[in-house]
């Protein structure tokens, strides 16, 4: 099959699985580091040395410590949070993303006197600043998903839900997520939080990191996660036949698939051509949405993810256009936004 020439950057795209801290470019982290160094505020190594350009082979063992012991220490005040958020937004806009759901685990910054609520408010105000900038010619609209980390205690998880409630009304926060090191568990303690989210915030979307690693891919864990009635699930790697059928049976569930992340981190066996995108993209009962997860770490922008599936799975221009268009069905941003996006999408 020949692959039609498609300008993947110009193609209007939606990104539904991107972690804020993992989406910061190394150049931007370097800028933050330079400023802190000048002010005598950091002893950390230069990001361009710590994370050399071109290094993308972070696996599950090296990935999580990169955040807890490095990136979080660089992005540790209001200035850095605003600066990095604006940089992430302009990177997605420059790549042709027209709708972005950015996710983040609310983080207090004690040295800067910042509470978790102020952390969320700072990101939302950076989004507003970006969207109202008269020099910004992009079509990008951004919403926020707040994540519960698998390491969180139950009170911390309830705090995330409370923040969703606080900021959902203003239209900024549209979803809640479960993320974090898949080796950490068990996750069933969070059941009541997601149950309460579903019951009291019916417009809040639920997305869950799902079967990301073998440790988090047991049938018991996956049935528990499905019992929380997620609207979307992310990664979807280690599924047995029973779970696969259960996912299909739900009807219309969004699957956030992250090819480069999974290949570079060695989360799947083999290369791109053996990625489970090949197994899912034609399944009518589910909606596949290509996503980057952590473009700052894995280095593949969303435009490249589309180029990769075209190359490795032979998608035509028509296939690519209908893949993006179908993804609009599973955004958390509401019907008005869906209409705007359908107007922007290329017809095959
Ligand atoms: Zn993720």
Image: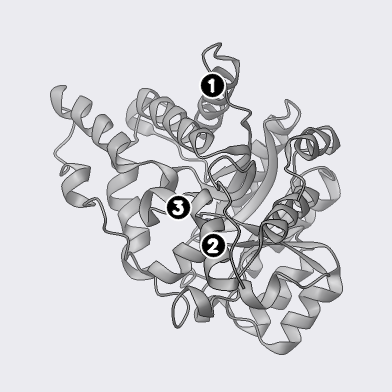
Q: Earlier in the sequence, mark 3 or mark 1?
A: 1
**Helix, strand or loop for disc 2:** loop
Q: Give the answer, above or below, for where 74 lies relative to 331.
A: above
The residue lying at 24 percent from left, 36 percent from top is 30
Out of 219 and 255, give the one closest to the viewer: 255
Q: Name the residue under label 3.
A: 294
Distance from the alpha carbon under mark 3 to that under mark 1: 21 Å
Q: Mark 1 points at which residue?
A: 130
Task: Tell me: is circle 3 under 8 Å from ligand 1.
Answer: yes
Can residue 3 be seen at all in this image of the molecule? yes
Tell me, yes or no, whether the two marked residues, 2 and 3, touch with CB atoms within 8 Å. Answer: no
Out of 46 and 195, give the one closest to the viewer: 46
Q: Which quadrant: the N terminus?
A: bottom right
Tell me, yes or no, whether the two marked residues, 3 and 1, touch with CB atoms within 8 Å. Answer: no
Q: Residues within 10 Å of mark 2 (few under 14, many from 20)?
A: many
**Helix, strand or loop for disc 3:** loop
The residue lying at 39 percent from left, 26 percent from top is 83
Query: In the image, residue 207 lies at what x, y percent?
Result: 68, 56
Distance from the alpha carbon under mark 2 to that under mark 3: 9 Å
Task: Tell me: is circle 2 under 8 Å from ligand 1.
Answer: yes
Query: In the image, residue 335 lies at what x, y percent?
Result: 85, 37
Q: Which of marks 2 and 3 is nearer the N terminus?
A: 2
Q: Name the residue under label 2.
A: 258
Tell me, yes or no, whether the two marked residues, 1 and 2, touch with CB atoms within 8 Å. Answer: no
**Helix, strand or loop for disc 1:** helix
Q: Residue furthest bottom?
A: 241
């Amino acid at each position: 099959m020949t692959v039609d020439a498609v300008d993947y950057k110009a193609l209007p795209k939606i990104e539904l699985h991107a972690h804020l801290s993992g989406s910061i470019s190394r150049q931007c982290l370097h800028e933050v580091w330079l400023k802190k160094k000048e002010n005598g505020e950091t002893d950390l190594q230069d990001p361009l040395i710590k994370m050399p350009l071109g290094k993308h082979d972070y696996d599950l063992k090296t990935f999580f410590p990169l955040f807890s012991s490095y990136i979080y220490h660089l992005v540790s005040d209001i200035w850095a949070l605003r600066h990095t958020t604006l940089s992430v937004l302009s990177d997605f806009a420059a790549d042709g993303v027209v709708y972005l759901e950015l996710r983040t685990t609310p983080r207090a910054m004690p040295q800067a006197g910042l509470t978790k609520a102020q952390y969320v408010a700072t990101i939302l105000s950076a989004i507003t600043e970006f969207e109202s900038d008269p020099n910004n010619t992009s079509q990008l609209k951004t919403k926020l998903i707040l994540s519960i980390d698998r390491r969180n205690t139950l009170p911390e998880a309830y705090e995330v839900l409370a923040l969703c409630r606080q900021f959902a009304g203003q239209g900024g926060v549209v979803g809640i997520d479960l993320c974090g090191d898949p080796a950490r568990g068990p996750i069933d303690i969070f059941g009541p939080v997601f149950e309460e989210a579903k019951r009291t915030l019916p417009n809040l979307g639920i997305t869950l990191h799902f079967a990301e690693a073998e440790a988090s891919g047991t049938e018991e864990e996956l049935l528990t996660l499905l019992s929380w009635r997620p609207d979307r699930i992310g990664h979807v790697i280690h599924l047995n036949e029973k779970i696969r059928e259960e996912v299909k049976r739900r009807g219309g569930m969004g699957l956030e698939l992250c090819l480069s992340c999974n290949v570079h981190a060695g989360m799947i066996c083999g290369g791109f051509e053996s990625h489970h995108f090949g197994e899912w993209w034609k399944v009518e009962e589910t909606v596949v949405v290509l996503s980057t997860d952590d473009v700052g770490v894995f280095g593949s922008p969303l435009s490249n993810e589309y180029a990769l599936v075209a190359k490795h799975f032979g998608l035509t221009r028509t296939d690519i256009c209908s893949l993006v268009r179908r993804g609009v069905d599973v955004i958390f941003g509401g019907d008005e936004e869906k209409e705007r996006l359908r107007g922007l999408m290329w017809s095959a």
